[in-house]
């Protein structure tokens, strides 16, 4: 049995949001309520994760599937330590790095400077950053755009550069949230190969993707979420994907060569 890398134990995550009307409780709105003698705006609770428990092991690539709003991104943010549990706990053996389409790069800086800053932020020494820089740029495919500000990049270019930066360093736990959705076929091929390398280097990968072929080709385990709860989880990747599609309306899955 491989070593546990992520243990999610009876996890509950609750968001608290202000009521409608755009009033978020800032100082001007509070003063206006005092003048008008209005009460504090209501706060609505959203129970995003409801009692979730599972274990992911060293070397696993875990696909997380489910409809929009099912809790996929919330789960990854909780594993990364970005969302505090309302109840229960998340235990990780090592650092969990979240890579998503909204990963923090600075739009006003060039791609080159973002590569350097991103690598330094991951703890890579300057000499290692300098050595890795050419391969990061080549992997991302941004070409000469690396000398331009990030705000000039297309969504796909930004996503590719984010993945190239994050995958330049081996992570104990890599959380990938739709970061491959905008890549072309060649980039997806390279990304799959890189994720396999990360797994071989004793890491654990979680992948959220609406393209189920990405899950099928990359992952050895799947977790299917619905309304913040686990519907099915296990290593029967094809079976769980088919059950999910059947529940969603019975649309046939596009089979890959791996099914042949």
Image: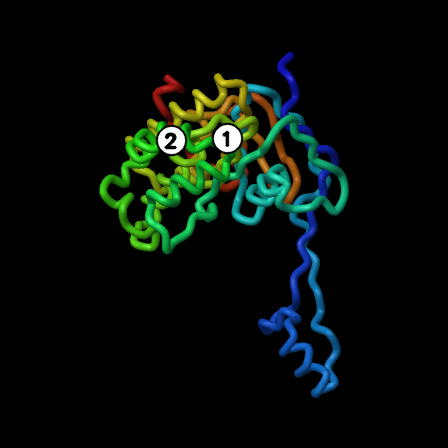
Name the image quarter holding residue 90.
top right
Q: Residue at x 52, y 31 (%)?
A: 174
Q: Is residue 58 above or below residue 125?
A: above
User: Which quarter shows the N terminus?
Assistant: top right
The picture places residue 236, in percent across and down from the top left corner, at 55, 22
Say left or right for 154 vs 179: left
Mark identifier at residue 254: 2
Q: Is residue 26 above or below residue 205?
A: below
Kind of element beneath mark 2 = loop
Residue position marked by numbered label 1 in the rendering: 241
Give 165 or 185, whichever is nearer the viewer.
Answer: 165
Q: Nearer the viewer, residue 178 or 160?
A: 160
Instruction: Give the percent coordinates (x, y) of residue 218.
Output: 44, 25
Q: Quadrant of residue 163?
A: top left
Q: Position of residue 257 (x, y in %)?
A: 34, 20
Element carrying mark 1: helix
Judge the density around disc 1: few (<14), some (14-19), many (≥20) Cα neighbours within 10 Å. Answer: many
């Amino acid at each position: 049995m491989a070593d546990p890398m992520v243990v999610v134990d009876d996890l509950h995550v609750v968001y608290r949001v202000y009521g409608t009307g755009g009033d978020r409780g800032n100082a001007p709105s509070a003063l206006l309520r005092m003048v008008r003698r209005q009460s504090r705006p209501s706060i609505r609770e959203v129970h995003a994760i409801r009692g979730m428990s599972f274990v992911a092991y060293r070397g696993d690539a875990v696909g997380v599937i489910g409809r929009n709003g099912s809790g996929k991104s919330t789960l990854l943010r909780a594993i990364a330590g970005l969302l505090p549990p309302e109840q229960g706990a998340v235990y990780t053996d090592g650092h969990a790095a979240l890579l998503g389409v909204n990963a923090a790069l600075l739009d006003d800086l060039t791609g080159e400077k973002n590569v350097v800053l991103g690598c330094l932020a991951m703890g890579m020494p300057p000499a290692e950053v300098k050595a890795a820089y050419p391969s990061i740029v080549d992997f991302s495919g941004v070409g000469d755009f690396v000398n331009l500000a990030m705000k000039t990049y297309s969504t796909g270019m930004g996503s590719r550069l984010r993945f190239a930066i994050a995958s330049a360093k081996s992570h104990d736990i890599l959380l990938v949230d739709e970061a491959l959705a905008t890549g072309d076929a060649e980039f997806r091929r390279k990304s799959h190969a890189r994720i396999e390398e990360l797994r071989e280097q004793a890491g654990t990968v979680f992948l959220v993707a609406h393209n189920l072929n990405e899950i099928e080709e990359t992952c050895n385990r799947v977790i299917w979420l619905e309304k913040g709860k686990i519907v099915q989880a296990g290593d029967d990747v094809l079976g769980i994907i088919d059950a999910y599609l059947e529940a969603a309306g019975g649309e046939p899955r596009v089979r890959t060569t791996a099914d042949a």
